[in-house]
Image (spheres, helix red, strand yellow):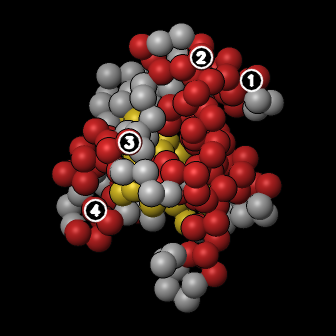
Amino acid sequence: MYRISAVCTGNICRSPMAEFCLVRAFENAGLGTAVEVTSAGVTAWEAGRPMDNRAKSELLNHGFPAASVEAFHARAFEAEEFARLDLILALDNGHLQELQDRAPTEADRDKVRLIRSFDPAAAGVPQEQLGIDDPWYGDMSDFDSSYALISAAVPGVVQYVAAALDSPSGTAR
């Protein structure tokens, strides 16, 4: 089983959208039983709370099942997760730095990547410009934009994980 977690600030906007998009993409690629996707926040500020209503609306507008979207509850990223995860997808540069700083080993630090680093259209874009701004402070158009940026990166994540699953070591190159 290949394990991934998408991580943003409170786990109520960007990372849940990434989780839902990734789960659907892995299922569509026939890898749903080989890949486990979760999401979390670098903080516990929103732990136990439902997803932001605007993020819910965005997911529902893209055909995600209402029951699954409504059942989602935020949680905080725990240090123990480094040991069980294969890939940790940070949604912005602040999350990337926070997670890399928390990583107990260099190998764990190497598991942390910006989700947009998997978007082929972002190739050559400086890392500091690859973050996805927090839509919580904006309006619905900001959620649309976040969803579009996440969606653009998902195929690259699927390709990366598929290569890892095909390699003898279980790690993509």
Q: Which residue is mark 2?
A: 141
Q: Is residue 108 left or right of residue 125?
A: left
For marks 3 and 1, give the CA distance.
28 Å
Q: Which residue is mark 4?
A: 109
Q: Give the residue drawn at x 58%, y 57%.
A: 120
For marks 4 and 3, give the CA distance.
20 Å
Circles 4 and 2, Cβ within 8 Å, touching? The answer is no
- The residue nearer to you, when weighing 19 against 160, is 160
Q: Is residue 67 visible?
A: no
Q: Is residue 78 above or below residue 103?
A: above
Q: Callout 2 environment at 10 Å: few (<14), some (14 to 19), or many (20+)?
A: few
Question: Mark 3: which secondary structure?
Answer: helix
Circles 3 and 2, Cβ within 8 Å, touching? The answer is no
Q: Earlier in the sequence, mark 3 or mark 1?
A: 1
Q: Earlier in the sequence, mark 1 or mark 4?
A: 1
Q: Amino acid at mark 3?
A: Gln
- The N terminus lies in quadrant: bottom right
Q: Give the residue drawn at x 72%, y 51%.
A: 25
